[in-house]
Amino acid sequence: MNDTVVKVESVFKKFGSNQVLRGVSLEVGRGEVLCVIGPSGSGKSTLLRCLNHLETIDAGRIYIDSNLIGYRQSGDTLYELHPRDAAKQRREIGMVFQSFNLFAHLTVLENVIQAPITVGKVARAQAIEEAKELIARVGLTAKLDSYPAELSGGQQQRVAIARALAMKPKLMLFDEPTSALDPELVGEVLDVMRDLADSGMTMIVVTHEIGFAREVGDSLIFMDAGEIIESGSPRDVLANPQQPRTREFLSKVL
Amino acid sequence: MTQNSNFKQEASEQGPSVAVFYAIKAKKLRHPVRAILAAALILLALVVAVDAAYRPAYDWPSVGKYLFDHRVLEAMINTVQLTVFSMIIAIVLGALLAIMRLSSNGVLRTIAWFYLWVFRGTPVYVQLVFWGLIAVIYQNMSIGLPFAEPIFSWQTKAALNAFTLAIVGLALNEAAYMAEIVRAGLLSVDRGQEEAAKALGFSWWQTIWNIILPQAMKVIIPPTGNELISMLKTTSLVTAVPYSFDLYARTHDIAAETFNPIPLLIVASIWYLAITTLLMIAQHFLERRFDKGQRFGAGRSFSAGRNFGSGRNFGAGRNFGRGRNSTRSQVR
């Protein structure tokens, strides 16, 4: 449980003149669930997108399983990775989006097997077998041949989780996975995520679900204006915030 | 089930006392102006038709005689071949150009832009004349290294006949227009689709081929059908190459022998119309097939992606780059 999966060292990122991340550092151990909370625009999502190199960073280092993300370091020199190699790094990092982003032209089963077949070069029969297991795990066996538009938001997000798991990632990133859902559908997605956490998956979850963070998170960070303001065990931070900005935020969401 | 039907029975026994239904039995609204207009138009059409039937200049017996003339039929087949072959090349090349324009590779982007600039910026007729003169401009074509003895060499005139040149000319011009259609299709696919594929480890090509292009088809197909129909008629310009065995040039030549151009114009028009009609029917079925995509394209994941996408994605995605974002904002 003690080895580190994610290591972020003072990462800076700006979009134009907007400094979105100002020296973010954190570590996530294997099997750990890190929840990230904070007001919108605080850089939570950007941080997540930097972790799998969907965004490039301006300064700092990100290591996943001791591999530098997006670059190759030789001595003091950094070399940009070829897109092919950046893509290879992303295979090991699953990502779940706020807006699901299921492939609209593919059925549930096809959504889940597409990446293993195309990217992982897994045989189709094997991919289908594994996909069916994953889809059963998120409770959607009855919807194998449905198209995304025929599913509720909660069901779509569960398929999206299964799709990400199909690549057998070491790390799962959740970018506000329940924020686009109707309130009555939030629970089913959180249940799937809770099961996943119980199974020992390393997860980083950007969320507004304070209850989930308290219950499932092993650690929690509060971000504001591109910085980590406070971090610690979810119970401590949520029950007894030390920083005024954390207190202010929590008073609004709790 | 039984409970349900019992319940229904009860309800109907109680009948009007529970719920009163006022069935709609209204008199249909009348449209007298429409009726008069339609009658007037039918009358007008009849007058024109009867007049045309007896007007000697149309020379209907000649129309009948030449409609299935073997020269005309062969020319019709040539026209169809010109249309089909040049459209196939244009679609493939156009897709390639569209993908090049959206690539992160600046060299490819520039090549595609230059191609479009030249081939959209000059009339197709002028281009066809140029292709006709290619054998004069480049007498020989050879494969080999510069400044060395060529490995293979052909005489241009022998290698490229007028039919081939006509196809090349039509296809290269059309490819520029197809490129814009395909590009619009690729841009119509939600950004989130590309991001999701990328996050799963898809390469750029795998993303385009497996995720973006299939979803772009429903936007690409209807205008491509229009281009196909338009191409059928543009083939009448190949006389500029000069190629003279297509439907228009052939009927024109026959008319020159008989000194009777009008019936042969009618013959050509009838065939163009007949083929267009077939193409329209084919297009109808093709669009209905891709209606499936339409239904799913309007799905939930898309609307959600749109709502949140613009805020979160700023500066993202160098691959599709500025072209994508700017086109979007224009559309909006």
Image (cartoon, rainbow, N blue to C red):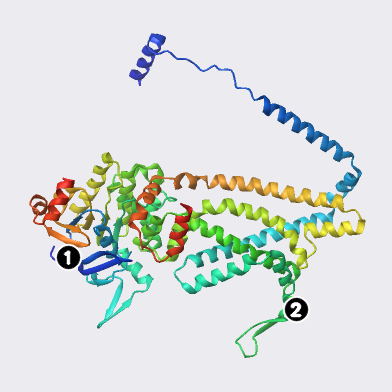
Q: Position of residue B151 (x, y in %)?
A: 64, 86
Q: Residue at x 31, y 71 (%)?
A: A70
Q: Residue at x 20, y 49 (%)?
A: A194
B30 or A210, which lies in front? B30
A52 or B181, which lies in front? B181
Is any part of residue B217 visible from this angle? yes
Q: Is residue A66 left or right of residue A159?
A: left
Give the quadrant of the N terminus of chain A: bottom left
What kind of element bears circle 1?
strand
Callouts 1 and 2 in the same chain: no
Disc marking residue B120? none
Task: Residue B97: name its quadrant.
Answer: bottom right
Instruction: Name the residue that disc number 1 marks.
Output: A27
Disc marking residue B136? 2
Three-letter code, disc 1: Glu
What kind of element bears circle 2?
helix
- The chain that hosts pointer 2 is B
Q: Position of residue A64 (x, y in %)?
A: 24, 68
Q: CA distance from mark 1 to mark 2?
A: 71 Å
Q: Position of residue B65 (x, y in %)?
A: 88, 48
Task: Categorize mark 2 by other alpha carbons within 10 Å: few (<14), some (14-19), many (20+).
Answer: few
Task: Categorize mark 1 by other alpha carbons within 10 Å: few (<14), some (14-19), many (20+).
Answer: some
Q: B128 above or below B189?
A: below
Q: Residue at x 68, y 67 (%)?
A: B169
Task: Residue A154: name its quadrant.
Answer: top left
Looking at the image, the residue that sits furthest to the bottom is B148
Q: B185 above or below B296?
A: below
